[in-house]
Amino acid sequence: MSDYLEPSETDLEDVDAYLYQGYDGRRQKAAVTLTVLWGGTLILHIASWGSWAILCLTAFLSVHALRVLLARSISAPATLPSSNTDTDIATDIATDIARRNTDAIAPLDNWPYVSILVAAKNEEAVIESLVEALLQLDYPKTRYDLWIINDNSTDRTPELLDRLAQQYSQLRVIHRPAESTGGKSGALNSVWTQTKGDILAVFDADAQTPPELLRQVIPIFDLPQMGAVQVRKAIANANTNFWTRGQEAEMALDAYWHKQRAALGGIGELRGNGQFVRRTAIERCGGWNEETITDDLDLTLRLHLNHWDIQFLTYPAVQEEGVTNAIALWHQRSRWAEGGYQRYLDYWRLIARNRLGFSKTLDLFSFWIIQYLLPTVAVPDLVLAIARNRAPIFSPLASLTVAFSLVGMFIGLRQTQKSSILVTLIQSLRGTLYMLHWFVVVASTTVRISVRPKRLKWVKTVHQGQIDDATLDVLANKK
């Protein structure tokens, strides 16, 4: 847990002064960064001290990686008791109360109010099942509501939502006109100020949520500095093919990384689907940023800049569809890579001034090296290595990255699955091979945004309502 300091009025004014001034000139800033990285790669190859510089950087990151691996993760607080009044649940309520070691649980009518937001565009395949699942959550019906924003869908999504709104009093449906802008951020901004939730929960239209989700997430907000909570994402159709199995391993790695980084006082991140944000935190950030293509990654940094923490919850997970082919994966990951890179370009002044604090700045810098610097310099490093008949100068750093990912993926899979060590090792090796696509995605993205104008279009992933047999069995057992 990072040290929490209540921000002063000067701090908040300082943050607000820079918060929306970095969006212009992204291409120029990206081009300068690319020139510096490629030019630096050339200098490192030519200079006699180049290899030593990379070895020192690798040693530094090795220490940070070890700290991440050894960080003691924060235990999740006890789950709130079930809101069901069935006699069959009475034992579970008593058990929950005993485990919380208190009989002073607030009456149901005093539980935090939760407003669930979903931006939906052409989601006729999944929207009905989503609404039914979210309105069956084990949380007092009088303490949460559901807002679906139909973002100018051209399929049957509007008709299905209107019919569901007549059936469920908790459901609010908002139809955005064709001229609406801002993508998903714009859709969320169009409704969140109308809600009354103390906590705002955001899901994608393909989300599959367990009934106990709210009861396990909400207690985390008892911590005053907790601005948001991200729930682990799992792939519902993981057994479809190589690509979905790779995404399953990727989500396990992502979950492990962020849980450990948050425990170390680093950057906990939001992942869009299954994110919960404190209302006062989103108010301080001025809502969602409509000048980015990844609202979750941008909000992550703005929350931390405003001195909020983000916690990660491993259990339960929110299921979502994985993309099933290489082309869809490329488009999705390119969008993620571009949005992730944009936030460094937008907020670099605040980051450089250490507005995040030392622990978070160090963590952000370390993962920027792994996630963006290394893939960006990979091509010129390889070309120069071939021309000079020597090993790539960044090979020690690349080896560390692959090893770190492999170990993190193995531990993450062991924590989220009930497989043998051998099976988990095979999954980790296959997942590590799959993860190499990020080198190509990030390298091409950093070059593209340096030479092409910015793109602010919401290119959504098509959802088919897919779910594999293993997930069906799990859901059947829960029922």
Image (cartoon, rainbow, N blue to C red):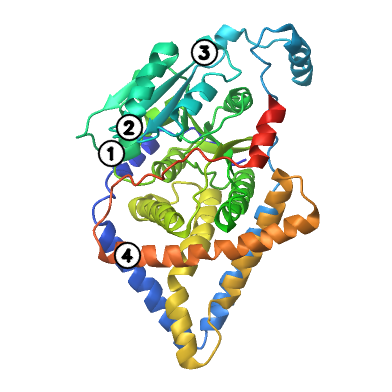
Asked if the residue under mark 1 is in contact with the one under mark 2, i.e. CB atoms within 8 Å, the reply is: yes
Q: Locate the C terminus by quadrant.
A: top right
Residue 233's quadrant in the figure? top right
Asked if the residue under mark 2 is in contact with the one under mark 4, i.e. CB atoms within 8 Å, the reply is: no
Question: Is residue 313 toward the left or the right of residue 375 in the image?
Answer: right
Residue 19's quadrant in the figure? top left
Q: CA distance from mark 4 to mark 1?
A: 22 Å
Query: Is residue 195 something one can see in this rendering?
Result: no
Q: Position of residue 412 (x, y in %)?
A: 68, 50
Three-letter amino acid code at the position of disc 3: Arg
The residue under label 3 is 143
Q: CA distance from mark 2 to mark 3?
A: 23 Å
Which residue is depicted at the point 62% across and 44% down? Answer: 259
Q: Earlier in the sequence, mark 3 or mark 4?
A: 3
Give SS at disc 4: helix
Q: Locate the N terminus by quadrant.
A: top right
Q: Position of residue 237 (x, y in %)?
A: 58, 44
Question: Is residue 238 toward the left or the right of residue 183 in the image?
Answer: right
Three-letter amino acid code at the position of disc 1: Gly
Q: CA distance from mark 2 to mark 1?
A: 7 Å
The residue under label 1 is 182
